[in-house]
Image: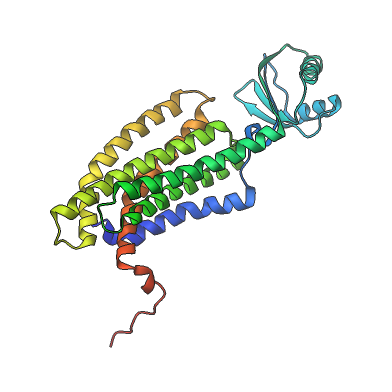
Amino acid sequence: MIDIVGKRYWFFAISALVIVPGVIALLVWGLPLAIDFTGGSMLEVRFRANRPEPAEVVALYAEVGIADPLVQTVGDSDLAIRSREISVEEKSAVLRALEERFGEPVTELGFERVGATVGAEVAQRAAGAVGLAAIGILAYITYAFRGVTHAARYGVAAIVAMLHDVAVVIGVEAILGHFLGWEVDALFLTALLTVIGFSVHDTIVVFDRIRENQSVHRRLEYEKQVNHSIVQTLDRSINTQLTVMLTLLALLLFGGVTTRHFVTILLIGVFSGTYSSIFNAAPLLVVWEKREWRTWFRRKPVAA
């Protein structure tokens, strides 16, 4: 039988190797927040033939009286221009200036405005949604496993696995945001909450099998019970998540630019959720049962 629990510290180390670069990126570069959270205006335009360079658009905005816009290229002919909150009249002035400066018609693809107060409120509700989800998951799992000894441990282990996936997703977003210019918007929050749901669902499947095996294999050591339960659910977990990941991969390859960010975050999060449910959540129960943290920093006895 595959000994997954016996190699638990190797799997914990792999998780750390994935999370630490993301945490460093988050501390150094931060998360690039979209106007959904910071407030401002986003104007998306398309040029028929010759798309100007972002620096030229920044200079044109300054002439119109709008300072420090963030200009991002999209595809071969589109620009996404983010700036302070501007009025409809200022937007019309920008479009006229673009057409006059670059000598060709400019098509407006989209325009949205979000006030700074609304953006701050969305950010607070986003953090509250993640926190509320964690509390709800902890309460539900503790209640559902109330017939098992130390039921609260299962809830805490599921939350730790969920936080692992949240850390992976946010860390990857910080890295991709720096190098690809992707921003944290409402769709990113939707993807994050979806990842949390997938992660907890897969973790509960493993935990439920542990609960069943505790009544069937009562004399078996707890570590072996947990490992046996993981191996029993391994095929189901991998096949279920692989089906989702193949669908997301198809969307990533053929879905177009508009959904690429959302699908990429979902794909990374689903993969992380599968890993944490199998290799982190259940082995963490064994660490807790044996109270192994008491020996982490002890010096091993020297052999005679």
Q: Is residue 283 above or below residue 237?
A: below
The picture places residue 209, in percent across and down from the top left corner, at 22, 47
287 or 298: which is nearer to us?
Answer: 287
Which residue corresponds to the image point at 80% horizontal and 20% vertical from the top-left?
A: 90
The picture places residue 74, in percent across and down from the top left corner, at 61, 26
* Quarter of the image where the C terminus is located: bottom left
- Looking at this view, name the residue that lies furthest to the bottom: 304
Q: Is residue 299 above or below residue 286?
A: below
The picture places residue 270, in percent across and down from the top left corner, at 40, 39
**Left or right, residue 26 beside residue 137:** right
Q: Is residue 1 above or below residue 79?
A: below
Which residue corresponds to the image point at 81% horizontal and 29% vertical from the top-left?
A: 66
> Residue 236 sits in which quadrant?
top left
**Left or right, residue 90 beside residue 1:** right
Which residue corresponds to the image point at 61% horizontal and 22% vertical from the top-left?
A: 76
153 or 58: which is nearer to us?
Answer: 153
Which residue corresponds to the image point at 39% horizontal and 80% vertical from the top-left?
A: 299
